[in-house]
Amino acid sequence: MKIPGRRRRPTGPGAEALPAQSAEVFPDPGVEVLPDPGADVLPGAAVDAVIELAAAARTYPGPPPVHALRPTDLTVRRGEYLAVAGPSGSGKSTLLNVIGLVDRPTGGHYRLDGIDTGPLAEADRTALRGRRIGLVFQAFHLLPYRTATENVMLAQVYLATPRDRRRTEAVDALLAVGLGHRLDALPSAMSGGERQRVAIARALVNRPSLLLCDEPTGNLDSASAGRVMDTLDALNAGGITLVVITHDPAVAARAHRAITLRDGQLSEKEAKSSTGRPR
Ligand SMILES: Nc1ncnc2c1ncn2[C@@H]1O[C@H](COP(=O)(O)OP(=O)(O)OP(=O)(O)O)[C@@H](O)[C@H]1O
Ligand SMILES: [Mg+2]
């Protein structure tokens, strides 16, 4: 099947929340994008919902089976900033991997941008993830003997982008996270916060509409964590939808919404604000 491309100049509800900043920082690469075929968007899908989980669950086969994510309903709208908290082993990474199309739910349904991901073949899931989702893991996963720019360029190797343009786009992504002065630095010569921002730049370089972060400030001192949080705030202000796993109350405080997982069961405190950030 054809993978629908991200809309360039969207209209309709939620359009105002789309990445004005990204459009500015990332020049249009001119990549051929397939139009979104309406047939893939299920009737009844909320127009501005990016993530829609309906009784989505994930059980690891045992013995004994582990119900890492119990049947979960969750809708995240375009432009939202959602914090995910919960004790170790409660299912946070499992949830993020389902949302990030890394793992399939073993039950229920997941629609991304209105597209039912259930019937997609593995190659289609990978292509959809590559176009729309950026993932930032707690361990930075940077190659030690490659510069910041080269590490970001690695995210594009699966695209048929010429090397020169990959470099330009990688530099743009590093500028967007405030690392214009560290383009040629090796990870070993960077602070933890800078490395994490390289990882964020790498997740951003293909211009996703959804950024997923697993403990982005987990290993950082408070000053570095502050820079990473500022970067996430700026990206969200530019329209990117953010889902951030965090144990850090300071990160959760910046989000619009906070959910908590316990033993794979999701609960949500009342939203601080239905429209914007709680300030
Ligand atoms: N591949 C796997 N096979 C079997 N069980 C798994 C697997 N991965 C995770 N689990 C189990 O699923 C549950 C949820 O794990 P998950 O990694 O989602 O937790 P988490 O909330 O991210 O924890 P942490 O805060 O420690 O990262 C745990 O009980 C874990 O042991
Ligand atoms: Mg985890």
Image (spheres, helix red, strand yellow):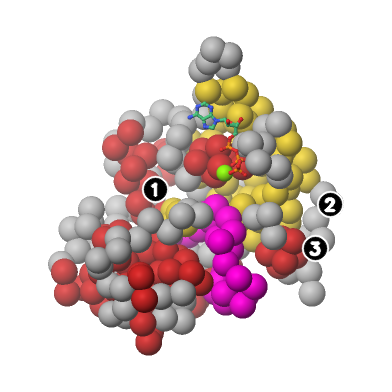
Task: Residue at 70% x, 42% y: name it.
Answer: 87
Whole-angstrom CA distance, mark 1 to mark 2, is 30 Å
Q: Quadrant of residue 169?
A: bottom left
Task: Residue at 65% x, 41% y: name it.
Answer: 88
270 lies left or right of 72 = right
Q: Earlier in the sequence, mark 1 or mark 2?
A: 1
In the rendered image, residue 205 lying in the magenta stretch gets the answer yes
Q: Local crowd at mark 1 within 10 Å, few (<14), some, or many (≥20)?
A: some
Q: Earlier in the sequence, mark 1 or mark 3?
A: 1
Disc 3: which residue: 273
Disc 1: which residue: 129
The residue segment tinted magenta is 204-232
Q: Nearer the viewer, residue 140 or 69?
A: 140
Disc 2: which residue: 270
Q: Is residue 95 visible?
A: yes
The amino acid type, in three-letter code, at marker 3 is Ser
Label 1 sits on a secondary structure element that is: helix
Vertical position of residue 233 compared to residue 109: above or below = below
